[in-house]
Amino acid sequence: MIPARRVISLIFFAGVTFFLVFYEASCSSPEKPSAGETASPPTGQLSLYVNFNGPWAFMQDPYDASKIVAIAPFIKDHQSAYAAATNETPVHTGVYELSGPAASPMNVDPQLVVVKDTISKAQFSDVTKNAGDGVHGVRYMIRLPMPSDLTAYRVGREAVATSWPVPNPGTNEKSYTTHMTLHYKVSGLTGIKLSGTADDRTPFDFTPTIGETGTLDIGVGPLYDLQETGCHDHGKTAFKALVDLFKVKQFIDFPGQDGQYHQSNCGNSDPQKPGGPTAPSPGHLGGSGADCKAAMLLLTVAG
């Protein structure tokens, strides 16, 4: 007999390939109770959207099947992570948990485009415990209740492969998810909290004030004065930091402004190049530091 946790894990990952699905919260008003009756609070009448941007990986918590874990690497050219609703707070490297929404059986649309790979429990534990030097950690880690679904709210044309350089990128490119939404059904938008401990042992406790849109944004991105190169070397650096954190072998390539891939011109400056880059990037796109456009990972934790 397959253990229940394994069954849940299989369900969690079996349908994951690619998606673009939109969900709508119910707008119907409950009937008023008749005289002498007590009104019951509405259940699941509102949608809460937790939006992630930056280089994140998602996986089912191998020690609690009712939770999903989001992990992003610390990158020196990035700002601190943040959590923002109608109020906002910085989030330093550490281990945190979002509480409030109830966990749900998750449906993953087969059209979701993410980079899939497998890691061991030992790899997962190494990332969980790795607090760097105790001041500057190597990762942001957030546990959340299992959402009802995962969706992409932004995608990018990219090519990903398990070898470098990415073979035939123009033929193999896909619209990979670069910003992910976790969707919850809730009875109200209060009682939600993000708490935990930063790697410098500072306690963290943030209560987001969720606005009418029902959104909480969690992200980490480049410094705004950072110039991305014409070869997308920063985006490649961010993706490399993400896959290196989990020791998985994945490589990414981005098209240039003309929509074409320029591996002969960009190969020597590619931070993913075995042995390291051997030349500076040949050009710049300008001062755009708001999005590194790294494809997101969806990992299976095996064993």
Image (cartoon, grey):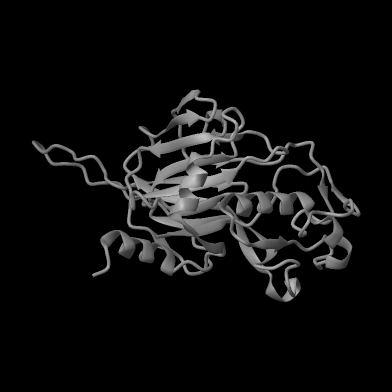
Examine the image and state in which quarter residue 200 appears.
top right
When the figure is inspected, residue 115 is found, relative to residue 219, above or below; the finding is: below
Foreground: 151 or 121? 121
Is residue 213 in view from this perspective? no
At a point 53% along the width and 63% down the height, the residue shown is 117
Number of labels in the image equals: 0
Q: Check the image and name the residue furthest to the left.
A: 36
When the figure is inspected, residue 199 is found, relative to residue 301, above or below; the finding is: above
Rendering coords of residue 116 (x, y %): 54, 64
At a point 52% along the width and 31% down the height, the residue shown is 86
Which quarter of the rendering shows the C terminus? bottom left
Foreground: 230 or 151? 230
Rendering coords of residue 270 (x, y %): 80, 56
Rendering coords of residue 94 (x, y %): 52, 34
At a point 18% along the width and 38% down the height, the residue shown is 39
Residue 291 in the figure: left or right of residue 103: right
Rendering coords of residue 44 (x, y %): 31, 48
Is residue 132 in view from this perspective? yes
At a point 72% along the width and 50% down the height, the residue shown is 237
Residue 11 in the figure: left or right of residue 294: left
Which quarter of the rendering shows the N terminus? bottom left
